Image (cartoon, grey):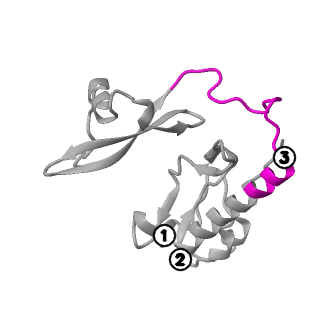
Amino acid sequence: MKNDLLDLSSEDLSLITGQFSPDDLIGLTHLGKLYRGKMPNGSVTMDVAVKILVDDKRIFMANVDDNKLTRLERVKTALALAHLLTYLHGRKYLIRSFSPSHIVVDQKFTPVLFEFGLLVGGVLGNTIDESDMRLGPFGYIDPFSARLGPGEIDYSSFVSSNITLAN
């Protein structure tokens, strides 16, 4: 079996991300820091994302008392998230795992998505492998999809129902 994985050193990753420049920091995730970078690939340069796992007790602060969301900010954030989901579903993405841990809110209360390892279709590939369409996060299968036969797909099952914006 051919292995196309690259073995990059920490020095390589530092060069790719401009020495982990704050300008290239995309954001903090629930597992670490995510940087944008540029990596040579033959005669072209590829845009890449580099995740650095951190062993920190607190990557972000939840429920900060001095930064309460107003009702208007909550509504704006919820609407922005709804627009984002509409966009993703309109592009025929299959989102197998969508949870609050994949969302952070920036200074303008705009939801930002991170870590979609279970996102397929759309610009990631024009076709979706229908043999495993019903799979979701480990240990879960949508009850409506479970009753379908092999190869049958019900796109209406791929909606998010577990997002809670609370303060």
Secondary structure under tag 3 reads loop
Q: Please report contact status of discs 3 and 2: CB closer than 8 Å, yes or no.
A: no
Q: Work out whether residue 8 or residue 112 is closer to the camera in this orientation and state it.
A: 112
Instruction: Please state the extent of the stretch shown in magenta in the rendering.
Output: 54-76
Residue 21 higher or lower than 50, as above or below: above
Label 2 packing within 10 angstroms: few (<14), some (14-19), many (20+): few
Q: Amino acid at mark 1?
A: Ser
Give the camera-side residue of 39 and 119: 39
127 in magenta: no
Going from the N terminus, do you reach mark 3 or mark 1 first?
3
Mark 3 neighbour density, 10 Å: few (under 14) some (14–19) many (20 or more) = few
Task: Locate the C terminus and report the quarter of the image it occupies.
Answer: top right
Q: Which mark is residue 131?
A: 1
Under circle 2, the secondary element is loop
Could you tell me the amino acid type at mark 3? Thr
Query: To which quarter of the image does residue 57 belong?
Result: top right
SS category of the residue bearing label 1: helix
**x and y percentages locating residue 27 in the rendered image:** 53, 38
Mark nearer the viewer, 3 or 2: 3
Q: Is residue 65 one of those drawn in magenta?
A: yes
Q: Is residue 147 above or below residue 52?
A: below
Three-letter amino acid code of the residue under disc 2: Gly
Q: Which residue is mark 2?
A: 151
The disc label shown at residue 19, or none: none
Residue ID at (58%, 68%):
87
Instruction: From the viewer's perspective, tell me whether residue 34 is left or right of residue 81.
Output: left
> Considering only vertical position in the picture, is 138 above or below 160?
above
Mark 3 or mark 2: name the one nearer the start of the chain: 3
Q: Which residue is mark 3?
A: 70
Q: Dots 1 and 2: beta carbons under 8 Å?
A: yes
Left/right of residue 3 with respect to residue 111 in the rendered view: left
**Observer-nearest of 148 and 129:** 129
